[in-house]
Image: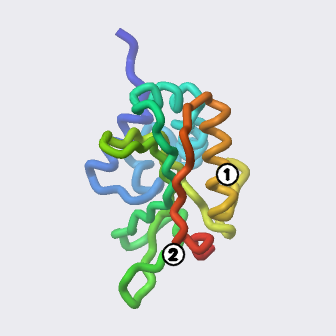
């Protein structure tokens, strides 16, 4: 039996121990933080094959729904931080993600991807900065290139360019 990669096991173990950053994952891994970041960047979970595999479970005539998700940060410190504006008066720290799913009335949604979205200050070659509009176009283009059948596109009009 092949030995499983230590990277996923390290990440799961770190998450179970409430790690909130790559620095928090590193002690649970057999590799240093820099190599851990490099390996994480190499693993794209939104390849064309991944999108095709997920889309095959979607109902015919489904729409591609794209929205932006803010995952609030609960830790004391944070890597890759960004700000979002909640319904409350104060600004909170959190990670921004692009979320896409195939949806059709009367059927369960079929999640396709959730991609980390960085702010302009945190842009790297691996994680380029994109405005909300650019991110939506990138998502539609990626799904079309993968051959995902899309009846139309539903977009969140309240993103206000994600206040980036």
Q: Is mark 2 on a helix, strand or loop?
A: strand
Farthest top residue? 1
Across and down, in percent, residue 114 comes to 48, 48
Depicted 69 relative to depicted 148: above or below: below
Which residue lies most toward the right here? 125
Say what secondary structure mark 1 lies in.
Answer: helix
**Real-space Cα separation, disc 1 to disc 2, in angstroms:** 23 Å
Image position, residue 68 (x, y; %)? 50, 61
Are there few (<14), some (14-19), or many (20+) residues within 10 Å of tag 1?
few
Q: Going from the N terminus, do you reach mark 1 or mark 2 first?
A: 2
Residue, x 34% and y 69% (percent of image)?
74
Q: Are marks 1 and 2 in contact (CB under 8 Å)?
A: no
Give the camera-side residue of 23 and 122: 122
Decide which of 160, 38 is in the foreground and name it: 160
Q: Which mark is residue 129?
A: none
Of 73 and 75, nearer the camera is 73
From the image, state whether disc 1 or disc 2 is nearer to you. Answer: 1
**For residue 82, side relative to residue 10 (left or right):** right
Q: Quadrant of residue 120?
A: bottom right
Pick the quarter of the image with the C terminus.
Answer: bottom right
Instruction: Provide residue 118's location: percent of width, then percent of height.
Output: 60, 61
Q: Disc 2 marks which residue?
A: 83
Residue under label 1, please give it.
Answer: 137
Residue at x-position 40% and y-position 63%: 71
């Amino acid at each position: 039996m092949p030995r499983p990669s230590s990277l996923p096991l390290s990440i799961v173990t770190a998450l179970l121990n409430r790690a909130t950053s790559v620095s928090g994952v590193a002690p649970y891994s057999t590799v240093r933080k820099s190599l851990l970041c490099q390996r994480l960047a190499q693993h794209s979970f939104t390849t064309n094959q991944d999108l095709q595999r997920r889309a095959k479970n979607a109902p015919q005539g489904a729409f591609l729904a794209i929205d932006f998700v803010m995952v609030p940060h609960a830790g004391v410190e944070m890597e890759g931080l960004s700000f979002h504006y909640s319904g409350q008066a104060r600004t909170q720290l959190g990670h921004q993600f692009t979320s896409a799913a195939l949806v059709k009335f009367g059927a369960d949604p079929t999640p396709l991807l959730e991609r980390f979205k960085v702010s302009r200050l945190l842009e790297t070659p691996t994680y380029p900065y994109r405005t909300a509009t650019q991110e939506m176009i990138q998502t539609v283009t990626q799904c079309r290139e993968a051959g995902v059948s899309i009846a139309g596109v539903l977009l969140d009009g309240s993103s206000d360019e994600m206040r980036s």
